[in-house]
Image: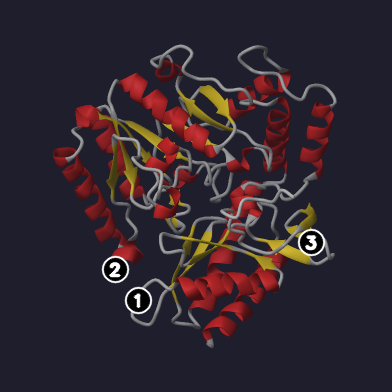
């Protein structure tokens, strides 16, 4: 009898029967508050009626129209709709299926357009599991261990993770930018550097937000040296942070934006956006793929954009995010086991540490597992897996946030004895 690979590590024992909004219902009928959202994917909640209806209607018309062979209406309409929300000047789109594919497409574009071999990524960043994307990922060795040698030409610069360094944010930011300049002098000359890749909020790296000074520093250096600034919005885009794009918080303009996850409410769809001028500098035929821009996924993405707008989900993410962050901080204040609570919008992480300030993965795992048993689904992240993250659907309401915080408070008290 066939079985799933034992290499797949399950975060919870839940076997789902169906989902509705912020809830998942298991095969025994138990209801769970889903504060994982499929790792930030089900932005409009589980099975939003408008998204379901759009997908059902499209399935009856066309399931797959390979988009370098034929065009279809959902693809063209989605491109037009995205044009209204993409950052200024980014008017050309390439579609794929997964975040890793989007990362690799951006890498290919950057290298071909600039004719430079190297890229700079941030310490703690996550960009995917395929070989090139894993080579660019530093949020944990589990994503790249055992598959070396990794892709050459990737160089790592510090991210202003103030809590990790034990500094204030300004000190961490100045350090990170100074080390980036040092990298350009010692490892990858600017005229050999094609792009800088950065997440507005480190995702797998521990839910650590960037800041305006840091992002402005990246933009200034990119402009000065003719380097492309690539902003990975795979987890932070489409309202997740309380603004439509995560980088909107920091008043910075990217050259390339990566999109996926919340774009299609659970249907596989990703892409990159750049200017027509930049896209034209790459090699003809260098972009493509069998399933990219799938008709059903595109229809779901159009419906997702409509729901985000009609239901004011960006504004809701900002309001509920403040509620969630403040509530999680109140809980953390009652126990020394949580060293910091941080986040942006509906991305909130609680970092567990020991009495001497060392990462405490065991207590984080115990809290996450206990929460699961009590009907609140959460995930861990961070290089040491000592951060418990909350990433609910954008449709979450105040009562549901309060319910999650109630459960979380009880869980933290029980596993820490505080």
- x and y, in percent, of residue 255 in the image: 40, 29
With 261 as the anchor, is 13 left or right in this view?
right
Q: Secondary structure at mark 3?
A: strand
Residue 357's tag is 1
Question: Which residue: 53% across, 61% down?
Answer: 348
Q: Which residue is mark 2?
A: 166
Q: Earlier in the sequence, mark 2 or mark 3?
A: 3
Residue 316's tag is none
Residue 405 shows up from this direction: no
With 227 as the anchor, is 341 left or right in this view?
right
Q: Secondary structure at mark 2?
A: loop
Residue 168 shows up from this direction: yes
Q: Earlier in the sequence, mark 2 or mark 1?
A: 2
Q: Which residue is mark 3?
A: 26
Q: Is residue 292 above or below residue 416?
A: above
As measured in the structure, the alpha-carbon distance from the residue carrying label 3 to the one carrying label 1 is 38 Å
Question: Are the residues at dot 2 and dot 1 in contact (C-beta closer than 8 Å)?
Answer: yes
């Amino acid at each position: 009898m066939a079985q799933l690979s034992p290499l797949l590590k399950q975060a919870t024992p839940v076997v789902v029967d169906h989902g509705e909004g912020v809830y998942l219902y298991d095969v025994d009928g138990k209801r769970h508050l889903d504060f994982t959202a499929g790792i930030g994917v089900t932005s409009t909640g589980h099975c939003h009626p408008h998204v379901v209806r759009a997908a059902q209607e499209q399935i009856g018309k066309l399931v797959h129209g390979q988009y370098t062979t034929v065009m279809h209406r959902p693809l063209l309409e989605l491109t037009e709709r995205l044009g209204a929300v993409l950052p200024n000047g980014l008017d050309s789109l390439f579609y794929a299926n997964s975040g890793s594919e989007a990362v690799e497409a951006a890498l290919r574009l950057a290298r071909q357009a600039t004719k430079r071999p190297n890229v700079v990524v941030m310490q703690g960043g996550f960009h995917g599991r395929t070989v090139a994307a894993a080579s660019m990922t530093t949020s944990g060795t589990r994503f790249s261990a055992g598959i070396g040698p990794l892709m050459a030409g990737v160089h790592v610069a510090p991210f202003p993770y103030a809590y990790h360094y034990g500094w204030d944010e300004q000190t961490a930011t100045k350090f990170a930018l100074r080390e980036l300049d040092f990298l350009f002098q010692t490892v990858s000359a600017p005229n050999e550097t094609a792009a800088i890749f950065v997440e507005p909020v480190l995702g797998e790296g521990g839910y650590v937000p960037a800041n305006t000074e840091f992002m402005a520093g990246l933009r200034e250096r990119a402009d000065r040296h003719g380097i492309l600034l690539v902003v990975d919005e795979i987890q932070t885009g489409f309202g997740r942070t309380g603004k439509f794009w995560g980088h909107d918080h920091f008043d910075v303009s990217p050259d390339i934006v990566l999109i996926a996850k919340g774009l299609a409410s659970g249907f596989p769809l990703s892409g990159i956006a750049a200017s027509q001028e930049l896209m034209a500098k790459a090699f003809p035929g260098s972009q493509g793929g069998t399933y990219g821009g799938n008709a059903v996924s595109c229809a779901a993405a159009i419906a997702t954009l409509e729901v985000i707008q009609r239901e004011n989900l960006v504004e809701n993410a900002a309001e509920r995010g403040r509620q969630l962050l403040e509530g999680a901080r109140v809980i953390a204040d009652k126990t020394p086991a949580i060293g910091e609570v941080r986040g942006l919008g509906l991305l909130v992480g609680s970092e567990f540490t020991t009495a001497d300030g060392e990462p405490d993965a065991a207590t984080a795992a115990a809290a996450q597992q206990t929460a699961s048993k009590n009907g609140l689904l959460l995930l861990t992240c961070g290089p040491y897996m000592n951060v418990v993250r909350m990433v609910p659907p954008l449709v979450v309401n105040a009562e549901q946030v309060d319910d999650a915080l109630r459960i979380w408070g009880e869980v933290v008290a029980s596993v820490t004895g505080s």
